[in-house]
Amino acid sequence: MKLGLHRPVLGGKVNFPLCLAPMVGLTHVALREVMREYLPLDAYTIWPTEMLNSRRVPGENLEKTPETMRSPSENGLVPQILGNEEGPIADTVKRLVEWGAEAIDINMGCPVQKALKHNYGVALMGDPAYAAEVVRMTVKNSTVPVSVKLRAVGSTKEFDELLTFVSGLRNSGAAWVCLHPRTAAQKRRGSADWEQIKQLHRAVDFPVIGNGDVQTVEDAILMLQETGCDMAMAGRGLAARPWMLWQLGEELGFAAPAGREGQKAPRTSEEEGAEYGRVLLKLIERSRHYFGEDLAMRKVRFYVRTTSVWLPFGNFLVGVCAKARTTDEMLEGVQKFFEGPVEMSLRTELRQ
């Protein structure tokens, strides 16, 4: 059975069915750069930014703002915007396309209060007509495809409601949707209802990306097989295990990532623990390069708090990074932590 990409994403440019989810504080240039090193040779996928506020982007220096910094060699960039007014959306889209966006993603899945207050994010799901209008005004002002990331409306029984909502987005010009099948009320609790991804993919005629509960390469493969979706999107699981890209590449017959020719992707818990250490050391250095000392340390600490839940003594590593007063001290502490064997667990309760 073909894994994913039953319908073309980015006009058929995308040939790899796993991608990173946009995450506030995490999906910045330094992490993307470290993660790209694990992308198999000749694989092409989409890459997110952090969530960008369409009221702020028009006045920002995109080269110096941490959320929009990018490396000149990056491809497949699909920045994610929050917005609900045509003026700021039009200005934002124009700037992001000039900046190098290959598509624009609209966030209709963020359940945090700040987004709800301004009728952004998941608040738009309460108003299908207005949500469709937001897509229409974005498409009208964009020369690149426009996608939407959304959450489930409720249980599988309310699937008709979800389908009506997505049909409105499709009719307004959305090129694909990504569904995270947890309700806004669930936030990250409970299980993602993959059945909704499956039903949605069957019911529509454009690409559907599935998101939720992908912690390992086996999860990604299972999601693609069980739901028939076009791509699997993973957030914290993929941020913690960038080599999932390499592992999936091996399953799909892609060559190893550039510079890793003849090597095999890490598979055992000890190999994965050691690789996590290497990722973290690179992330500290790349973060320092892009963000300078103070912001780099804040970004790395946030990454470690989010991803160290897969390590048996993750809290200790959080402490090591919290105590460091410079990035050099951080590098030293991390190196020491990973001197002995560290095992990485396959799954964790993703509740924090």
Image: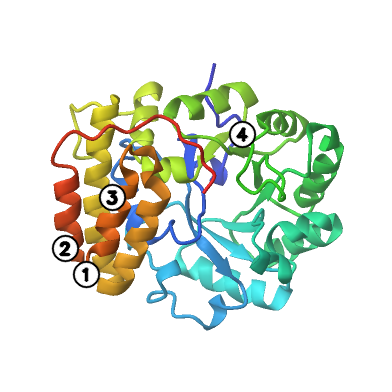
Residue 346, visible in the rendered structure: yes
Sequence order check: which comes first, mark 3 or mark 1? 3
Q: Are marks 4 and 3 in contact (CB under 8 Å)?
A: no
Asked which secondary structure carries label 4, the reply is loop
Sequence order check: which comes first, mark 3 or mark 2? 3
Percent position (x, y) of residue 129?
86, 58
Q: Which residue is mark 3?
A: 317
Between the C-alphas of marks 1 and 2, the distance is 6 Å
Q: Which residue is mark 4?
A: 7
Between the C-alphas of marks 4 and 2, the distance is 48 Å
Residue at (39%, 53%) from the top-left corner? 305
Taking the image as shown, residue 73 lies to the left or right of residue 99, namely left
Please tell me whether mark 4 or mark 1 is closer to you in this view: 1
Q: Which residue is mark 1?
A: 325
> Which amino acid, by three-letter code, is at mark 2?
Glu
Tell me which corner region of the image, top left, top right, bottom left or bottom right, holds residue 309.
top left
Percent position (x, y) of residue 122?
71, 56
Between the C-alphas of marks 4 and 1, the distance is 49 Å
